[in-house]
Image: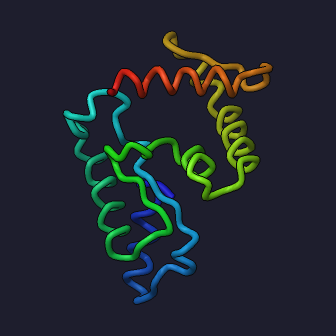
Amino acid sequence: MHEVTSPQAFEGLRLAGRKPWRVDSVIATADHNTPTRHWDRGIDDPTSRVQVDALDRNMRDYGAKAYFPFRDARQGIVHVIGPENGATLRERGIAATRQLAKRQFTWLRASSAIAFDPYARGVERAVTAHVADAVAMVG
């Protein structure tokens, strides 16, 4: 679970007076609206900040099996943190990552800074190395 679509789901539960089903299966992280670098500066975009704050509040109010908020050392890409932390099957993480890469290949290819071919042999290692470099820059 991440901060982009979960606020609507939690608001619907609140309005209906219901609680999430199987909270013990929820793995959540701030993902799409967090900066890659300069965590010390926080989240500049007001809309992004509201979404991340809503996820923080919803996790505090409802709970989760695991929650890795912004600035937590384990926070990261929602499709990756589950397998990394033993919460989901490794194969499901790989399948989800490949699926995401296929969908986003067009915009990644358009970026002059980075592009990965989702069908290339060893693409997982290349992506992992790139992410590790980005994390190292964050410090």
Please determine whether, in this image, residue 107 is positioned above or below residue 91: above
Please determine whether, in this image, residue 74 is positioned above or below residue 107: below
**Which sits in the foreground, 130 or 106?**
130
* Picture coordinates of residue 136, whole percent (x, y): 40, 23
Q: How is the image coloured?
A: rainbow
* Picture coordinates of residue 60, whole percent (x, y): 32, 70
For image coordinates 67% across by 24% down, the residue present is 125
User: In the picture, which quadrant includes the C terminus?
Assistant: top left
List the single residue furthest toward the left.
41
For image coordinates 27% across by 34% down, the residue present is 39
For image coordinates 72% across by 36% down, the residue present is 98
**Which sits in the foreground, 87 or 123?**
87
List the single residue furthest toward the bottom.
17
Residue 51 position by quadrant: bottom left
For image coordinates 46% across by 42% down, the residue present is 76
* Picture coordinates of residue 64, whole percent (x, y): 46, 69
In this image, 32 relative to 126: left or right? left
* Picture coordinates of residue 6, whole percent (x, y): 45, 62
**Which sits in the foreground, 58 or 84?**
84
